[in-house]
Amino acid sequence: MKNRIRILATTDMHGYIYPYRYADGLSMNHGTARLKTAIDAFRDENTLLVDNGDVLQGSSLQFYHYTNDPEGISPITVSMNAMGYDYVNIGNHDFDFGENALITHLDSLSCPCITANVIYRGEPFCASYAIREIAGKKIALFGLVTHYVKKWQKKKNIRHFQFRDAFMVASKTVDMIRRLEKPDYIICLYHGGFERDIQTGRPVEELTGENQGYMILKEIPGLDILITGHTHVEQCGKAFNKVYAQPGKNGQAIACVDIYTDTGVIEPRILKIDTEPDETIMELTETAEKECQEWLDTPLAHTNMNLKIEDQVEARLHKSQVVTFLNHIMLEASGADIASTPLFTDAAGFRKDITMRDLVNTYVFDNSLVVKKINGHKLRKYLERTAEYWSIDQNRIIVSPKFIVPKAKPYYYDMADGIEYTITVSNDIGHRITSLTMNGEPVTDDMEFTICISNYRASGGGDYFTLRDAPTVAEVQTGMVELIALWLLDHKTIEFEPVNNITVQK
C-alpha cells in the first residue's frame, strides 16, 4: 500500500519450525513453516520483517542440532533465511549453546543484528541502530536484550560478553538517533517484557531490572514503537503516546504494526497463526528433522513405575516421582545433602520405555549444577520463597495468580529431596513452612547443609536471592540432560521406593 508502512515482528520462536509437538506429534499452530505462509500473505514492498530474539533454544530439533553438530548452521537459521528477515535482535536464550553457536548463527543470517546494549571483547557486538527509507519516510530501528542475561547464563557461554542496562542504552540511543538522523519514526526491539501493568502502573513482578518495558514506554520521549518479548505474552496497544506489541512465543502469532504515512496514525495488532505450513521451509530442514525424530525415539531405559505427568498442577501439589528421580541424579552427581529442582513448563515425564523424547520433553533446559552452602535459617527462607507458589481460593489450593500473570512460571516452584517439610498455604507468606526435618529430626537455624540446584537458580533466577548470595562450594559442569541420559544408559531400569517428603496442605 502506497501510504502505509508495515512492520511484521516475531519473537521467542525458540527453534520451532514444524507444526507439531515433539512430545506426541500433535498438530500445533506454531513454527516458522506456518509463519512463512502468513508472512507472505501480509507482506508487500513497504514491509519490514524483524525478529526479537530467543530463536536458538527450545525445540527438540535445535537441541538435537547442538548436541550432534554444534559447529554447524542450525535449522532455525536456515529457516529464518528462507523467510527473508530484514533485521534481528538477540534474546537471553540465544546464548544457551555458547558464544560460537550465537556468532555462527548471526554470521549465517542474511540480515544484520541490531542489538545495541551488548559488548563483545570490548567492542559493540552489533550496530547501534539501522536506518531504512520506506514509502518516503525515514525509519530507525535498534534492539536491546534484557541485561539480566549475565545473572542467569553459564559463565562459559558469555565469557567475552558484557551487557549494559537496557533502559539506559535505550534512552541514549533514541536521543542519538533523533539528533543525528532526524527520522520520522523510531522502532525499538526489546527482548524484555513489562514490569508493570501498562494501564495502572502497578508492579506485576519484583522490580529487579529483568523487564523494563514499562519504564522504556513511559520515560523515553521520541520513541514511536516498542516491540517486546521474553515474557511470552500476546499483547498490543497504545500508551504514553507510543505503540507496543508482543506476539507471544514459538511462532504462534505475529505482531503487525501499520504506520499510515498520510495521517501519522499507527495501528498495532496481533495476528494468530492458523495458516497451512510452507512446504519449502520444511523441505530445507527435512534431513535434520528426520534424524532428530530417530534420535528422539532411541530407547535409553525402562521403568515399571508411573513417571508420566498427566496433570501439571497435581505433579507439583503432590510431588511427582519424576522429581524424586531428578533429585536423586543431582545428589549422586554432586554429593550434596539436599537437591532441589522444579518441573519445567508442560514437562511430559517418562513412559515405560524411556527415550530421548521423554528426556528432552521433561528436562527442557540443559542446565549445569551448582552446590551451595546454607544453614537451616537460609534453607527455611528458600523454602518459604517456593511456598509462595500456592494460594487458597474458595477453600481450594490453587496456583497463585502472580505465577500465572503476566507469564506462567511453574518453573519457579522447587521441590527438594533430602529433607521433609510441610507447606501450610493458608498461612501468611513467609510463615508457611510449618514443619522442616532431615531424617526425621527438626532442622534448626544453625545447622549447615550443602544443596544442589541448577545454575539458573544459583544465580538468583526466580528471585531466589537467598541461594544466589550463599557461598558456592562446587559446580558440576556436565549438563543435566547429559547426566540423566548417562544414568539411564548405565542403569537401564528406573526402580525405587517412592519418596513422599513434601506435604502441601490448606
Image (tube, rainbow, N blue to C red):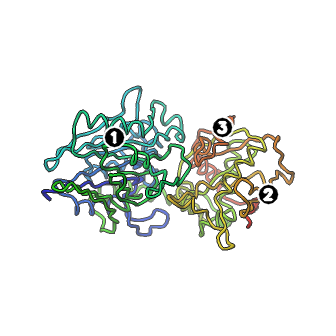
Q: Nearer the viewer, mark 3 or mark 1?
A: 3
Q: Does residue 47 appear left or right of residue 326 in this picture?
A: left
**Which disc is residue 434 wearing?**
2
How many numbered marks, from 0 up? 3
The residue located at (30%, 59%) in the rendering is 268
The N terminus - image quarter: bottom left
Choose top left, top right, bottom left or bottom right for residue 305. Answer: bottom right
**How many C-alpha atoms fall within 10 Å of the one at disc 2: few (<14), some, or many (≥20)?**
few
Name the amino acid, label 3: Asp
Residue 346, compared with residue 58, is above or below; it is below
| Residue sitting farthest toward the top | 122
Residue drawn at (69%, 62%) of the image:
319
481 relative to 277 in the view: left or right: right
Q: Is residue 254 visible?
A: yes
- Name the kind of residue labelled 1 in the image: Leu
Mark before the other along the chain sequence, 2 or 3: 2
Residue 469, numbered circle: 3
The image shows residue 455 at horizontal and vertical percentages of 59, 42
> Which is nearer the eye, 116 or 103?
116
Work out how far the residue at label 2 is from the one at label 3, CA to CA, in angstroms.
24 Å
Which of the two marks, 1 or 2, is nearer to us in this view? Answer: 2
Q: Earlier in the sequence, mark 1 or mark 2?
A: 1
Seen in the image, is 220 located left or right of residue 265? Answer: right
Residue with the mark numbered 1: 106
